[in-house]
Image (tube, coloured by chain):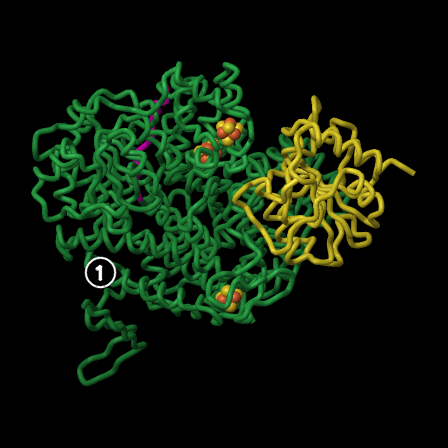
């Protein structure tokens, strides 16, 4: 059994011949970490240690609940009816139950990243050694800002990261135990626990990504990473293809290494290596000639296309249907993660040749093979040997079959009614019956690829296959370029943009992150990203959103990654990489506080979160968030003071954090210049909110970038974008400008006259103290207030 | 008509909406003391026969004057149709405030009835859930052609023809003396 480290910290130690300050000793593992900064108040915080910060946030941004069901069925007392004030047998009420569910969702999300990180790290330590240094090059000194901030250590080696994860793992267990029947009785306390988990999630993601960056030599923040190919157009490949789906790139790396060792060239020469979902991002970070098919929504359709000659499934954002779908097209299936073994036989002890022959000619459709080196050999050999046998066998109907299938459609509507986004599948299939395939072809761009319509149809209509056939010509043209995930933001970039961000002169940092549960297709994400990059916001992205952004061409035929630079600068479009690379986006916000403003990080969470909330105009947009991981990522951003906007499906997370501009007290902060309490207006107004459609999102993005610290010039620039977008969409001035304009100097020049006349109409007066040094936390304010 | 939600898997209960027809819905809106109408982005996409749903909403507002909030960035479309809605808000922001039993959009008496039209199904379903649990002083009614279990009153799932008929009945009842 692994020994967990025990941590002692001493403010000072005086002994014969020895004198030390801020000493930290960890027994049972390593290490006396380098003391590079004084230890802040909350290293390795336990659940309650940041509770007062959470309660501050939750006082301004109050939880807003929308139960997804009326009952609770989590124990054998239940089901308990919790409607309209009733309580369950354990005494829980509906708001508390919602907080509990949110904690469970965040615990699932955080555990998933943590177990991913643990799997990755343990393997890398075994392969490369615990002493492998964490060195991100001369442009990155603050290597792991989330880890420094939360855990309070400056990790030097992969071995150090193991202790970071041990802390996270222990906290997850502590937190999840609070959801047992009859435990926590306050929804606010549950929210504090959710925020705790969210914060831990960013640490776990950071560990996962930094470990793979240093061990696999992924790009270390290079703004000019190469462009890779992305798109469903790859169904046209002739060469044998290995397809990887999931999030853990370990197997992908083994495959590339195996190909290199065996003179099989780069992907695309003898063999195609392609990926779906985050594994795909990460393979291109290792070998940019690997290809990306697209986001999670393309899984079933691509498998059905028959292009893959071996399918490797690892973990996260995979579908339970992948084995069934692979069997339909005779694609050999290899499950490599113990998190998803699909009931398949464990063939770890079999020789490679036996596994390959079983999969190619032996009648075995799939295997569980967690030995990744062996799995790499098996995948490559299986793909090469099976390709001539299966001849890209697919289950997409031909034109004649199309009409036969469609002729059974009765237009009963059940497919639509089982579609998560209410797509008019019924009309589309029925139109095909009448000879028109255009409606089905259009659905291809909007469909989430979940397959629920097929399960509901009394005729078992293969809707997804019909869709692919109908959109065949278009799919073949779906070949785009994506800039390979670059990983962290450079310290040098932070130095350049720190000041304009904090002063508001760069109008905001907008992060398009998360999954593909889009209300109206991925195009909307590309359109939003492009709009804000053109407006010279800094646009960052990761995961499925980063892929959707690539799938667009401007008038000149360029994809957004070709149109905008990859630098973390005004007008840049920065793909950080897979979902775990989201830690670099929160990391960039933390680094602004540390590198630009010289705020100490070490165990100093509340101060940094206060800084980010008041001064860093960053906002996350998770337009198609569906997963529990997205819930914990968003909640982690929230604890750090970064607001998040969700697409309409986001309401199903059951909880928002909403501010109310009329609640002046909650938008009052401490001013360290004067020592006074100062109203700041609703900036930012909400911490997490789901909006109805893209137009609402555009306005909300611009608005949630406002911060109390904006200089007059900064506020003027931010308001220019807010008002301009608002006017374009609503045809009038926003009705809350008087809450956001502090002095006449804040008013955008372009809109000066109309804004002034509106302000006059509503009786606006210049604010008494427009320029302040804002702190929401009293603790942090006291540290910086030098007056009376 | 069977009591199933429009979204088949989205099953609610024990408390579910009473199904109403257009006449009862119309009487209810007419009799309410201070109703509030909230319409969403689908008002432009859904068709009532050959006209977009928004045309019906405009007609209803002309027949029964009541506070109105255009959500989903539809304000301009109402103005173009000669209507000046009093408020633009995001629907989540409105429902947040509706939990407060004293609140009304016009600062007058609190609302007693909230009428929803043209919000996307899942989005509205969640908002109605919030009101059902945490704004128990309010009655909610939904005029879309899909049954919404989380409302107090809702049309059942209707064919387009049935919906047109019910909306007409509703208007007739709102207009009747
Ligand atoms: S956990 Fe509580 S509310 Fe849930 S079923 Fe058990 S007793 Fe009922
Ligand atoms: S469920 Fe099947 S039969 Fe019914 S409308 Fe859809 S495709 Fe046609
Ligand atoms: S596969 Fe596509 S069309 Fe079918 S239910 Fe899922 S999202 Fe809707």
Is residue A594 visible in the rendered structure shown here? yes
Place of residue A378 in the rendered image (x, y in percent of width and height, measured from the top left): 14, 37
Magenta residues, dominant SS class: loop
In this view, the residue in front, A259 or B76, is: A259
Give left or right: position of A722 versus A288: right
User: Which stretch is magenta?
Assistant: A477-487
Q: Chain of mark 1?
A: A
The picture places residue A87, in percent across and down from the top left corner, at 59, 67
Tell me where residue A607 sits by quadrant: bottom left
Spot occupied by residue A337 in the image (x, y as percentages of width and height): 24, 48
Q: Is residue A479 magenta?
A: yes
Which quarter of the image is occupied by the N terminus of chain A? bottom left
Q: Is residue A48 above or below residue A238?
A: below
**Horizontal and vertical percent for residue A328?**
29, 31
Q: Residues within 10 Å of mark 1 (few under 14, many from 20)?
A: many
What's the colour of chain A in the image? green
For image coordinates 37% across by 33% down, the residue present is: A547
Residue of label 1: A160
* Residue A137 in sight: no
Q: Compared to A775, does A19 lie above or below?
A: below
User: Element under label 1?
Assistant: helix
- Left or right? Give the position of A261 relative to A63: left
Image quarter where the C terminus of chain A lies is bottom right
Q: Is residue A712 magenta?
A: no
* Chain shown in yellow: B
The foreground one among A742 and B138 is: B138
């Amino acid at each position: 059994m692994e020994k967990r480290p025990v941590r002692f910290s001493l403010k000072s130690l005086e002994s014969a011949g020895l004198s030390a300050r801020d000493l930290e000793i960890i027994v049972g593992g390593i290490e006396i970490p380098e003391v590079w900064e004084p230890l802040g108040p909350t290293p390795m915080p336990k659940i309650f240690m940041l509770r007062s910060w959470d309660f501050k946030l939750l006082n301004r941004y109050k939880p807003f609940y929308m139960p997804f069901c009326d009952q609770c069925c989590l124990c054998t007392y239940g089901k308990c009816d919790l409607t309209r004030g009733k309580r369950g047998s354990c005494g829980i009420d509906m708001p508390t139950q919602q907080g509990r569910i949110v904690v469970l969702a965040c615990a699932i999300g955080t555990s998933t990243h943590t177990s991913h990180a643990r799997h990755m790290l343990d393997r890398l330590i075994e392969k490369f050694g615990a002493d492998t240094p964490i060195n991100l090059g001369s442009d990155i000194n603050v290597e792991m800002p989330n880890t420094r901030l939360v855990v309070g250590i400056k990790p030097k080696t992969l071995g150090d990261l193991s202790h970071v994860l041990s802390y996270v793992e222990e906290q997850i267990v502590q937190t999840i135990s609070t959801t047992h029947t009859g435990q926590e009785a306050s929804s606010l306390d549950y929210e504090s626990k959710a925020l705790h988990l969210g914060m831990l999630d960013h640490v776990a993601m950071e560990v996962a990504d930094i470990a793979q960056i240093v061990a696999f030599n992924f790009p270390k923040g290079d703004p000019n990473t190469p462009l890779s190919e992305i798109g469903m157009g790859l169904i046209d490949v002739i060469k044998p293809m290995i397809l990887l789906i999931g999030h853990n790139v370990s197997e992908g790396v083994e495959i590339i290494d195996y190909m290199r060792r065996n003179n099989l060239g780069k992907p695309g020469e003898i063999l195609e290596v392609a990926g779906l979902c985050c594994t795909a991002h990460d393979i291109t970070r290792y070998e940019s000639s690997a290809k990306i098919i697209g986001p999670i929504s393309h899984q079933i359709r691509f498998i059905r296309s028959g292009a893959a000659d071996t399918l490797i499934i690892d973990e996260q954002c995979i579908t339970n249907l992948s084995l069934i779908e692979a069997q339909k097209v005779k694609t050999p299936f290899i499950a490599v993660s113990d998190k998803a073994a699909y009931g398949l036989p464990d063939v770890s002890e079999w020789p490679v040749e036996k596994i390959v022959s079983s999969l190619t000619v032996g009648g075995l459709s799939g295997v569980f093979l967690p030995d990744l080196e062996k799995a790499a050999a098996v995948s490559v050999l299986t793909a090469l040997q099976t390709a001539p046998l299966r001849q890209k066998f697919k289950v997409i109907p031909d034109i004649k079959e199309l009409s036969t299938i469609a002729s059974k459609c009765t237009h009963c509507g059940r497919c639509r009614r089982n579609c998560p986004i209410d797509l008019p599948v019924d009309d589309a299939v029925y139109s095909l019956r009448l000879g028109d395939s255009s409606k089905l072809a259009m659905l291809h761009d909007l469909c989430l690829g979940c397959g629920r319509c097929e399960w509901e149809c009394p005729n078992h209509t293969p809707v997804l296959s019909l869709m692919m056939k109908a959109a065949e010509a278009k799919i073949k043209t779906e070949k785009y370029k994506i800039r390979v995930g670059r990983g962290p933001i450079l310290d040098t970039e932070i130095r350049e943009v720190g000041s304009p961000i904090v002063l508001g002169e760069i109008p905001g940092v907008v992060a398009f992150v998360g999954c593909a549960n889009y209300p109206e297709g991925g195009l909307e994400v590309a359109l939003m990203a492009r709009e804000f990059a053109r407006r010279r916001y800094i646009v960052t992205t990761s995961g499925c959103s980063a892929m959707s952004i690539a799938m667009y061409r401007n008038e000149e035929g360029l994809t957004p990654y070709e149109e905008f630079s990859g630098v973390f600068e005004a007008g840049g479009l920065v793909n950080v990489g897979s979902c775990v690379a989201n830690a670099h986006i929160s990391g960039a916000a933390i680094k602004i506080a540390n590198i630009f403003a010289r705020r100490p990080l070490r165990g100093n969470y509340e101060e940094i979160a206060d800084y980010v909330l008041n001064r860093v105009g960053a906002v996350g947009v998770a337009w198609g968030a569906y997963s529990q991981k997205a819930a914990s990522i968003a909640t982690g951003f929230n604890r750090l003071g970064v607001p998040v906007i969700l697409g309409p499906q986001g309401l199903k997370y059951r909880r928002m954090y909403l501010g109310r501009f009329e609640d002046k007290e909650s938008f009052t902060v401490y001013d360290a210049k004067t020592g006074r309490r100062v109203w700041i207006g609703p900036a930012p107004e909400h911490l997490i909110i789901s909006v109805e459609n893209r137009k609402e999102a555009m306005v909300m993005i611009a608005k949630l970038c406002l911060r109390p610290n904006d200089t007059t010039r900064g506020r003027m620039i931010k308001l220019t974008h807010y008002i301009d977008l608002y006017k374009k969409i609503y045809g009038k001035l926003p009705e809350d400008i008087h809450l956001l304009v502090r002095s006449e100097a804040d008013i955008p020049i372009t809109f000066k006259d109309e804004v002034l006349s509106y302000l006059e109409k509503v009786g606006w007066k210049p604010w008494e103290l427009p320029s302040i040094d804002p702190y929401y936390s009293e603790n942090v304010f006291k540290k910086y207030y030098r007056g009376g | 008509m069977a009591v199933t939600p429009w979204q088949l898997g989205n099953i609610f209960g024990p408390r579910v909406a009473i199904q109403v027809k257009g006449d009862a819905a119309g009487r209810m809106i007419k009799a309410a003391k201070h109703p509030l109408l909230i319409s969403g982005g689908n008002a432009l996409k859904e068709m009532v026969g050959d006209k977009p749903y928004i045309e019906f909403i405009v007609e209803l507002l002309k027949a029964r004057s009541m506070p109105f909030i255009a959500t989903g960035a539809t304000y301009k479309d109402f103005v173009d149709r000669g209507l000046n809605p009093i408020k633009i808000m995001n629907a989540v922001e409105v429902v947040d405030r509706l939990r407060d039993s004293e609140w009304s959009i016009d600062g007058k008496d609190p609302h007693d009835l909230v009428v929803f039209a043209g919000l996307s199904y899942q989005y509205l379903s969640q908002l109605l859930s919030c009101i059902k649990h945490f704004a128990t002083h309010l009655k909610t009614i939904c005029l879309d052609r899909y049954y919404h279990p989380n409302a107090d009153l809702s049309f059942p799932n209707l064919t387009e023809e049935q919906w047109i008929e019910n909306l007409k009945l509703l208007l007739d009842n709102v207009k009747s003396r």
